[in-house]
């Protein structure tokens, strides 16, 4: 059940009083981590008595893992808190179950290891996160009995009759900027309450860290509006449209003169490892994507790899402007909205730069 709008606005007004109470030097630090399902986020907050200057000033903490054993929260990246403001922090953490194993099966640590190996290539990433907004009643935001909410439009539309949820997209954008999340942009997507934001352009592991924090901030912003952002790729039964998370990728060579040849070489390698990539491009080992990469609604085929310049119905696209310039980056359109960015980035780098073929 959602609160009536007047109750919600009363709550927000009353909350202002408490948040404006004077306090001393104390700093509220919110530890944020990715659940073991690699899809959901969790967080908890503690007081530090001095403002941390960097990640090293933030102590490890503990949390309970899914199997009820105790796990360690290892801080990896610090952001400003856009909800309670300076000096408070949001801190992305790795949930480490076995402190005695340096990387174990922690997807972030594994990604860090691979990114260290390819540092000389200066790998850059940018990811395009799509999501769909729902009300607490389970209906798509802006749901109406006449089916208005089901209309499919082109992306980037303007007009209250064409989309729903710009307040949330705008608030999220500004909160990311405040936090120090590298948000690249945002736009309305093709469904009524569907939006996209992009994160990047980031070198190496920063990409995944910033995307996870941008997702966390999105869920927190949505709490304030009493709506829910679904990163499920296909939350609308009966619609061919889904939410995806395109990943854009380049190396120093690809960005330099004559780079197109290196882009094409990387795409050739990707074409030979299609199914391996799909197995890490959604939160369920490929089980989500098989229903969504249907070749309809701006998607490519789950079963066959394809590529082209300027086409949005292929697995991997070379943007038109990149083809014209002869250098730049390419876009892998296969990752699903609920993907964990670390294994996606890792697969790209292993295939394109480390020659892994298995
Ligand atoms: P699209 O045209 O596919 O909708 P967007 O404008 O939504 O693309 O997003 C572009 C993405 O490409 C951004 O995330 C940006 O960070 C990323 N990007 C731009 N240049 C590069 C580059 N040289 N290497 C990697 N990513 C890049
Ligand atoms: Mn407790
Ligand atoms: Mn986009
Ligand atoms: Mn999009
Ligand atoms: Mn795209």
Image (tube, rainbow, N blue to C red):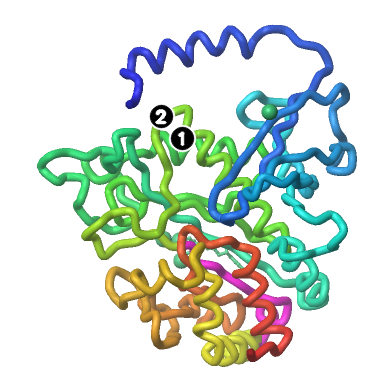
Residue sitting farthest toward the left: 146
Q: Quadrant of ligand 1?
A: bottom right
The Cα atoms of the two marked residues, 2 and 1, are separated by 6 Å
Q: Position of residue 325 (x, y in %)?
A: 56, 80
**Residue extending furthest front?**
68
From this view, report whether residue 142 is shown above or below residue 215. above
Apparent side of residue 135 relative to residue 264 in the rendered image (left or right): left
Task: Estimate how packed mark 1 is, as few (under 14), some (14 to 19) or many (20 or more) residues with alpha carbons within 10 Å.
Answer: many
Does the stretch in magenta take in 236?
no
Q: How many marks?
A: 2
Tell me, for residue 226, which label it has, or none: 2
Residue name at image x 87 percent, y 35 percent: 53
Residue 117 percent coordinates (x, y): 82, 76
Which residue is pictured at 74% across the width and 30% down the height? 29
Q: Nearer the viewer, residue 179 or 256?
A: 179
Give the residue pinned by disc 1. 222
Tag 2 near tag 1, CB within 8 Å: yes
Q: Is residue 312 above or below residue 266?
A: above
- Which element carries disc 1, helix, strand or loop? helix
Q: Secondary structure at mark 2?
A: loop
Which residues fall within the magenta stretch? 245-258
The quarter in which the C terminus is drawn is bottom right
Query: Residue 345 is drawn in which quadrant?
Result: bottom right
115 left or right of 150 in image: right
Residue 14 visible in rendering: yes
Name which residue lies at 61% across and 91% down.
Answer: 265
């Amino acid at each position: 059940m959602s609160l009536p709008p007047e109750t919600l606005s009363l709550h927000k007004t009353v909350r202002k009083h408490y948040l404006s109470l004077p306090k001393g030097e104390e700093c509220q630090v919110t530890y944020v981590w990715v659940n073991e399902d690699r899809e959901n986020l969790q967080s908890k907050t503690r007081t530090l008595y001095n403002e941390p200057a960097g990640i090293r000033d933030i102590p490890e903490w503990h949390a309970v893992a899914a199997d009820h054993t105790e796990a360690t929260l290892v801080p990896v990246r610090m952001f400003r808190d856009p909800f309670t403001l300076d000096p408070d922090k949001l801190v992305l953490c790795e949930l480490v179950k076995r402190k005695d194993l340096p990387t174990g099966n922690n997807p972030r640590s594994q990604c860090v290891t691979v990114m260290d190996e390819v540092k000389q290539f200066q790998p850059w990433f940018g990811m395009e996160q799509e999501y769909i907004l729902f009300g607490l009643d389970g209906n798509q935001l802006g749901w109406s009995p006449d089916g208005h909410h089901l209309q499919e439009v082109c992306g980037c539309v303007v007009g209250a009759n064409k989309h729903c949820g710009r307040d949330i997209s705008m608030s999220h954008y500004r909160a990311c900027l405040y936090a120090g999340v590298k948000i690249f942009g945002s736009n309305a997507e093709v469904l009524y309450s569907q939006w996209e934001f992009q994160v990047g352009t980031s070198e190496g592991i920063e990409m995944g860290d910033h995307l996870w924090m941008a997702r966390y901030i999105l869920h927190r912003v949505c709490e304030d509006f009493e709506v829910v952002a679904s990163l499920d790729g296909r939350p609308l039964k009966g619609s061919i449209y889904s939410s995806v998370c395109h990943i854009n990728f380049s190396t120093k060579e690809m960005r330099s003169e004559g780079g197109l040849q290196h882009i094409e070489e990387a795409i050739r390698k990707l074409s030979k490892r299609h199914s391996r990539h799909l197995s890490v491009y959604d939160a369920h080992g490929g089980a989500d994507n098989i229903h969504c990469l249907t070749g309809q609604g701006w998607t490519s085929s789950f079963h066959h790899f394809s590529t082209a310049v300027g086409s949005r119905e292929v697995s991997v696209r070379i943007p038109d402007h990149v083809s014209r310039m002869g250098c730049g980056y390419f876009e892998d359109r296969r990752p699903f909205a609920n993907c964990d960015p670390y294994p996606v980035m890792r697969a790209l780098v292993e295939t394109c730069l480390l020659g892994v073929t298995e």
